[in-house]
Image (cartoon, rainbow, N blue to C red):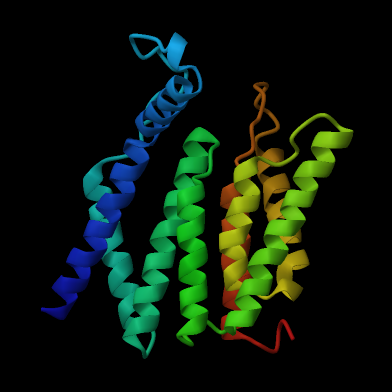
């Protein structure tokens, strides 16, 4: 019975990911339209204009329900503490949702990044995360500051956004899971995996827009697992 409960909880979380990704473009269009109406109330259009941001295919909902349920069972049965498994499962769903949205739309949700940041701090505060609360806060602020600095410098000197605004918000959330001393390794792994992706897609003559969030998330998971499983590897 307990496994069915885990399956149901994970399946509902998977359905939430599916619905969030499916409705993402529509929500963005509504937000842009409402913001335009607030800024220019005297020139508010009577009809919502068509947007180039269209809904993209993200698979069938049953796949999300099944995979979400199976992943929840893995997370809740692998660690000795059920709260650790629940925390890991919730973090995993948020990270997967962020990755999928950025992969499809090249956009990063600040709301999800802030939720991930809160989960990271909560895990550190409750002793679930291998980091202390202070280490989690320093890691978040360090990641946010470094990526924000890169964004500002690139925009001032090159007149081009080397990183999107969502990337430094994402680092605010991801930084709460790793120590600030592991930040160079995380950036190196993210750039390395991004370059590998570009090399494998070099034959494509179309312009390649690299969604950097998936590589940041993958690198964070690698660094976190190394730090969690083998402390002697990353002293």
Using the image as rendered, state which of residue 15 and residue 122 is in the foreground. Answer: 122
Residue drawn at 34 percent across, 9 percent down: 46
Total numbered badges shown on the rendered structure: 0
Q: Does the image show residue 218?
A: no
Q: Relative to 3, does residue 8 appear above or below in the rendering? A: above
- In the picture as drawn, the residue positioned furthest to the front comes out as 42
Name the image quarter holding the C terminus: bottom right
Q: Residue at x 65, y 79 (%)?
A: 135
Q: Is residue 131 above or below residue 14?
A: below
Residue at 50 percent of width and 23 percent of height: 39
**Residue at point 84%, 43% (across, down):** 153
Q: Position of residue 129 (x, y in %)?
A: 51, 81
Residue 46 or residue 167, whichever sits in front: 46
Instruction: Using the rendered view, name the quadrant where residue 42 is placed.
Output: top left
The N terminus is located in which quarter? bottom left
In the current view of this chain or complex, which residue is farthest to the left?
A: 1
- The percent coordinates of residue 177 (x first, y second) are 57, 72
Nearer to the camera, 66 or 25: 25
Left or right, residue 159 beside residue 62: right
**Does residue 223 appear anywhere in the picture?**
yes
Q: Quadrant of residue 179?
A: bottom right
> With respect to residue 193, does 224 lie above or below?
below
Q: Is residue 160 left or right of residue 120?
A: right
Residue projecting furthest to the right: 157
Relative to 194, is 57 on the left or the right?
left
- Residue 174, percent across and down? 58, 63
Residue 75's place in the image compared with 52, above or below, is below
């Amino acid at each position: 019975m307990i496994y069915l409960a885990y399956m149901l909880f994970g399946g509902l979380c998977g359905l939430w990911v599916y619905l969030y990704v499916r409705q993402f473009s529509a929500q963005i269009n509504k937000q842009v339209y409402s913001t335009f109406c607030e800024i220019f109330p005297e020139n508010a259009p009577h009809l919502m204009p068509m947007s180039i941001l269209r809904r993209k295919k993200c698979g069938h909902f049953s796949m999300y329900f099944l995979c979400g349920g199976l992943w929840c069972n893995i997370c809740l049965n692998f660690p000795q503490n059920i709260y650790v498994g629940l925390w890991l499962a919730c973090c995993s769903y948020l990270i997967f949702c962020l990755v999928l949205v950025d992969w499809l739309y090249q956009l990063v949700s600040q709301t999800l990044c802030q939720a991930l940041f809160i989960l990271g701090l909560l895990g550190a505060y409750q002793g679930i995360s291998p980091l202390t609360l202070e280490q989690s806060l320093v890691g978040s602020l360090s990641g946010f500051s470094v990526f924000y600095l890169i964004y500002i410098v690139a925009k001032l000197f090159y007149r081009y956004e080397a990183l999107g605004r969502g990337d430094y918000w994402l680092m605010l959330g991801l930084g709460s899971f790793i120590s600030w001393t592991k930040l160079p390794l995380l950036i190196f792994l993210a750039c390395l995996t991004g370059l590998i992706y570009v090399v494998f897609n070099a034959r494509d003559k179309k312009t390649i827009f690299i969604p950097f969030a998936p590589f940041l998330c993958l690198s964070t998971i690698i660094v976190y697992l190394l730090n969690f499983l083998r402390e002697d590897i990353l002293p």
